[in-house]
């Protein structure tokens, strides 16, 4: 039987595209373009959002 993995929510900052390449306009000696690899800083390149922490209510007072 297949293993079922729970669905994780997609990162709202990168919409599931955590790594992009941006061209600098320059070229290498072999003619290929020089690219910068940029990673989403919120999800650290995973494309998935971390589950929200469960807020814990602390009883205070009497």
Image (cartoon, rainbow, N blue to C red):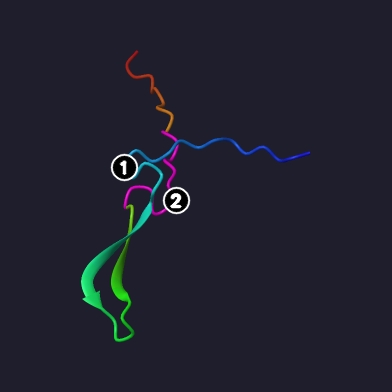
Q: Which residue is drawn at the image coordinates 67% and 37% (left, top)?
A: 4
Which of disc 1 and disc 2 is earlier in sequence? Answer: 1
- In which quadrant will I find the C terminus? top left
Residue 48, percent across and down?
Answer: 44, 43
User: Disc 2, disc 1: CB below 8 Å?
Assistant: no
The answer to whether residue 23 is magenta is: no
Q: Which residue is the extreme one toward the front?
A: 31
Magenta segment, principal secondary structure? Answer: loop
Residue 5 shown left or right of residue 2 in the figure: left
Q: Locate residue 36: give its quadrant.
A: bottom left
Q: Secondary structure at mark 1?
A: loop
Tell me if residue 34 comes above or below residue 62 in the rendering: below
The answer to whether residue 44 is magenta is: yes
Residue 43, percent across and down?
Answer: 38, 48
In this view of the protein, which residue sits in the foreground, 29 or 40?
29
Q: Secondary structure at mark 2?
A: loop
Q: Which residue is drawn at the image coordinates 74% and 40% (left, top)?
A: 2
In this view of the protein, which residue sits in the foreground, 45 or 23?
23
Q: Mark 2 and mark 1: span between their CA atoms?
A: 12 Å
Q: Which mark is residue 25?
A: none
Residue 54 shown left or right of residue 23 in the figure: right
Residue 20, percent across and down?
Answer: 34, 57
Disc 2 crowd rating (10 Å Cα; few below 14, some 14-19, many 20+) is some
Give the residues drawn in magenta, as a range.
41-52
Q: Which mark is residue 13?
A: 1
Residue carrying label 2: 46
Q: Which residue is the extreme one toward the top?
A: 62
Q: Which residue is the extreme one toward the bottom?
A: 29
């Amino acid at each position: 039987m297949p293993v079922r993995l729970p669905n994780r929510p997609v990162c709202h900052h990168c919409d599931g595209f955590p790594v992009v390449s941006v061209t600098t306009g320059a070229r290498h000696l072999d003619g290929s373009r020089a690219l910068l690899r940029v990673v989403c800083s919120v999800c650290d390149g995973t494309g998935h959002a971390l589950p929200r922490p469960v807020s814990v209510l602390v009883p205070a007072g009497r």
